[in-house]
C-alpha cells in the first residue's frame, strides 16, 4: 500500500460520514432540490476527464476523454441551473408571503 | 503554452473547492439557506475546474475548452427550457451523463495504462474497473428512467420470466469480465465489461414502475457519486474522491429516506417492485363485483364546491402533466371569493419526486400556509366537505390501510375517504403507477369527473363563474 492510497482511503472514510451527517435532518420539502444539487456535484468527474484529455496521446483516449468532458460539463451546468430554478420558486413565494410562518422545518 | 502551477497549489485549491461543496450540501438541506447552498457548491465546482486547468500534467487546452463549451451550452439550454413537470427526468438525464463520464474516464485510463510491462498497481486497476461497472450501470439505468418518465416507453414495470435470474447472470458475467480484465489487462475484457454493465443498468430499471422512479433516480445518483469517487482513486485526485463520496453517502441516505416516506425498504423498491403483482387483475375483479363508479358533471361539481365550507385539494402527478397548477389556483381564488376555505393536502411523494408538488404549486403562487403535509391534512378530512382529488391515485387508495394483500399495504395515505364527499378528476379508470386498482372510486361518497385535469378545471372555473 502506498502512502497516497492510505491518505485517499482516509479521505474516503471521512467523506462518507460527512455526507451522511450533512443531510441527516433534511425536510421532505427539500428532497428534490437536494437530490438535484448533489447530482450536479458528482459532475466533478469533469476534472477527471480534463486531466486525461489534457495529457492523452492516442486518439482513442482523446475521443473518450472529450466525450467525458462534454458529459461532465452537462452534468454540472445543467444540474446547478435546474436546482436554482427549483429553489427560485420557493424564494419568490417567501417574498410575497413575508408574514407567512416558515413551516418547512417541521 | 502552459498555465501550470505546482501540483501542491492545485491540491490546496481543491481543498478550498471541497469546502465550497461541503457548505453547499449543508446549505441545501435547510430551506432558508438552500439557494445559497446551491450557489456555494457551484462556486466550489468552478474553483475545482479552473485550477484543474493549471495542473502540471495538462498540456493541451483547446480540446478541453471546446468540450466544456459544448457541454455548458447543452446543459444550460436544457436546464432553462425544461418544464418544471419534466424536471425529474431531466435530473435523471444529468445523472446519467455523469455516470457515463466516469465510465469513459475508466475506459481511457485502462487504454492508457495497459498493457503494462509490470502489472498496473492493483488498487488503480480495481478502481478503474469499479468506475467502469458503476458508471455504466448509472448511465443506462438513468436513460431508462428518463425514457419511462418522458413516456418514451411504458411507465409500468416490464417483466419477463426468470428476470431476476437473467439479471443476476448478466451481473455475474460483468464481474467475471472485470476480473479477467484485471488479470489479463486485455482490452477485449474491458469492452465486454462495459457492454455487460450497460446492459445490466437497463435490466435493473426496466422492471421498476414509474411510481418508484424517484427512489431509483436517487439511488443511481448515489451510484454516480461512487463512480466519481472511484475515478478519484484512479487519478489520485482528492477533489474527485471528496466530491464523489459526499454524493455517494448523502445520496444513499436520501434514497433510504425516500423509500421510508413510501414505507418500503430500498431492496423492496429495487427487487420486488410492484411488478410482482399482476397489474389489472384487481381492476377486473372489482368490476365483476358489480360495483360501479358514479360520474359527476362539471356544473354539478361547481355547485358542490361553491357551497362547501372547506375544500381540500389533493394534487397528484396528473395535475402536473396537465400543467394544471395555475388552473387550480384560479379555481381556488374563485372559491375563496365565495368564502370557501381552500387547502391543499400534499402527500410526501405527490408528483414524481418528494417535494415536487410543492415546487409546482409554488410556481403557481399558491399561498404557502395553505399547503398541508400529510400529518396536518389527515385530521382535516373529517371537517372537509369536498376532497378534490386531481390526478392523484395511489396516495389516496384506502387499500393501503385495510387490504393486507395490496402491494400498497402499509404506505401512509391521505384519508380522503373521511371527507363528506370525494370527487376525483382523472383521465380514465386506468390504475396508477403502482398498477393497482383504487377501491376509493367504488365508494358511494366518491364521484368521478373524467378528462384531462386542466380541461376539467377550466370547465369548473367557467361553471363557478356563472354561479
Image: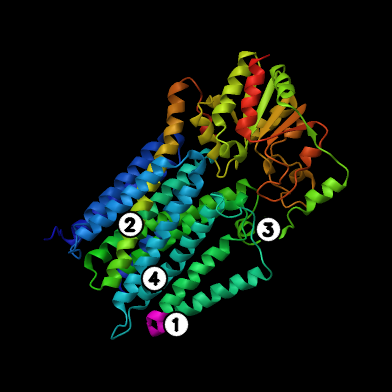
Mark 1–mark 4 Cα distance, whole angstroms, equals 15 Å
Q: Label 2: which residue?
A: A70
x, y (%) of residue B73?
Answer: 32, 48
Q: In the image, is B293 to the left or to the right of B6?
A: right
Mark 1–mark 2 Cα distance, whole angstroms, equals 30 Å
Mark 3–mark 1 Cα distance, whole angstroms, equals 35 Å
Residue B92 versus residue A66 in the image, above or below: above
Please give the range of residues in magenta: B180-188
The secondary structure that most of the magenta stretch takes on is helix
Q: Label 3: which residue?
A: B275
Host chain of mark 3? B
Host chain of mark 2? A
Q: How many marks?
A: 4
Q: Label 4: which residue?
A: B127
Mark 3 vs mark 1, foreground winner is 3
Secondary structure at numbered mark 4: helix
* First along the sequence among labels 1 and 4: 4
* First along the sequence among labels 3 and 4: 4
Residue B181 among magenta residues: yes
User: Within 10 angstroms of label 4, few (less than 14), some, or many (20 or more) residues?
Assistant: many
Amino acid at each position: 500500500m502506498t502512502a497516497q492510497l492510505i491518505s485517499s482511503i482516509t479521505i474516503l472514510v471521512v467523506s462518507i460520514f460527512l455526507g451522511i451527517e450533512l443531510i441527516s435532518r433534511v425536510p421532505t420539502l427539500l428532497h428534490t432540490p437536494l437530490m438535484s444539487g448533489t447530482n450536479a456535484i458528482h459532475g466533478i468527474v469533469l476534472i477527471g476527464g480534463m486531466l486525461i484529455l489534457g495529457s492523452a496521446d492516442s486518439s482513442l483516449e482523446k475521443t473518450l476523454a472529450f466525450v467525458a468532458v462534454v458529459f461532465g460539463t452537462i452534468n454540472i451546468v445543467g444540474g446547478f441551473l435546474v436546482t436554482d430554478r427549483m429553489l427560485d420558486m420557493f424564494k419568490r413565494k417567501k417574498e410575497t408571503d413575508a408574514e407567512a410562518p416558515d413551516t418547512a422545518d417541521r | 503554452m502552459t498555465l501550470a502551477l505546482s501540483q501542491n497549489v492545485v491540491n490546496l485549491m481543491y481543498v478550498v473547492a471541497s469546502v465550497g461543496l461541503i457548505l453547499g450540501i449543508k446549505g441545501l438541506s435547510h430551506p432558508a439557506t438552500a439557494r445559497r447552498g446551491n450557489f456555494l457548491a457551484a462556486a466550489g465546482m468552478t474553483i475545482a475546474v479552473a485550477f484543474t486547468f493549471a495542473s502540471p500534467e495538462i498540456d493541451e487546452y483547446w480540446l478541453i475548452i471546446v468540450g466544456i463549451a459544448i457541454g455548458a451550452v447543452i446543459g444550460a439550454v436544457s436546464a432553462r427550457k425544461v418544464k418544471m413537470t419534466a424536471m425529474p427526468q431531466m435530473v435523471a438525464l444529468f445523472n446519467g451523463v455523469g455516470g457515463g463520464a466516469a465510465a469513459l474516464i475508466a475506459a481511457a485510463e485502462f487504454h492508457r495504462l495497459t498493457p503494462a510491462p509490470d502489472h498496473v498497481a492493483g488498487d488503480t486497476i480495481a478502481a478503474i474497473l469499479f468506475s467502469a461497472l458503476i458508471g455504466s450501470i448509472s448511465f443506462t439505468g438513468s436513460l431508462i428512467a428518463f425514457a419511462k418518465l418522458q413516456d418514451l416507453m411504458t411507465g409500468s414495470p416490464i417483466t419477463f420470466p426468470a428476470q431476476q435470474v437473467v439479471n443476476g447472470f448478466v451481473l455475474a458475467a460483468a464481474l467475471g469480465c472485470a476480473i479477467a480484465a484485471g488479470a489479463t489487462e486485455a482490452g477485449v475484457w474491458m469492452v465486454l465489461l462495459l457492454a455487460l454493465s450497460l446492459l445490466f443498468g437497463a435490466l435493473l430499471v426496466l422492471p421498476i414502475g414509474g411510481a418508484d422512479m424517484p427512489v431509483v433516480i436517487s439511488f443511481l445518483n448515489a451510484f454516480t457519486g461512487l463512480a466519481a469517487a472511484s475515478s478519484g482513486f484512479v487519478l489520485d485526485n482528492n477533489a474527485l474522491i471528496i466530491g464523489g463520496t459526499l454524493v455517494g453517502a448523502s445520496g444513499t441516505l436520501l434514497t433510504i429516506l425516500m423509500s421510508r416516506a413510501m414505507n418500503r425498504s430500498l431492496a423492496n423498491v429495487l427487487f420486488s417492485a410492484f411488478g410482482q403483482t399482476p397489474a389489472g387483475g384487481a381492476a377486473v375483479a372489482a368490476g365483476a363485483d358489480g360495483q360501479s363508479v358514479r360520474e359527476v358533471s362539471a356544473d354539478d361539481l361547481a355547485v358542490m364546491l361553491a357551497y362547501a365550507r372547506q375544500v381540500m385539494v389533493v394534487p397528484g402527478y396528473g395535475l402536473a402533466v396537465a400543467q394544471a397548477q395555475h388552473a387550480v389556483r384560479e379555481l381556488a381564488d374563485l372559491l375563496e371569493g365565495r368564502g370557501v376555505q381552500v387547502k391543499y393536502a400534499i402527500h410526501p411523494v405527490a408528483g414524481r419526486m418528494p417535494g415536487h408538488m410543492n415546487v409546482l404549486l409554488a410556481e403557481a403562487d399558491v399561498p404557502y400556509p395553505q399547503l398541508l403535509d400529510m400529518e396536518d391534512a389527515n385530521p382535516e378530512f373529517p371537517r372537509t366537505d369536498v376532497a378534490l382529488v386531481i390526478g392523484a391515485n395511489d396516495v389516496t387508495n384506502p387499500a393501503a390501510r385495510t387490504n393486507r394483500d395490496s402491494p400498497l399495504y402499509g404506505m401512509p395515505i391521505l384519508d380522503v375517504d373521511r371527507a363528506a364527499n370525494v370527487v376525483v378528476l382523472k383521465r380514465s379508470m386506468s390504475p396508477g403507477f403502482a398498477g393497482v386498482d383504487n377501491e376509493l372510486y367504488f365508494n358511494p361518497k366518491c364521484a368521478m369527473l373524467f378528462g384531462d385535469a386542466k380541461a376539467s378545471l377550466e370547465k369548473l372555473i367557467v361553471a363557478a363563474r356563472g354561479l
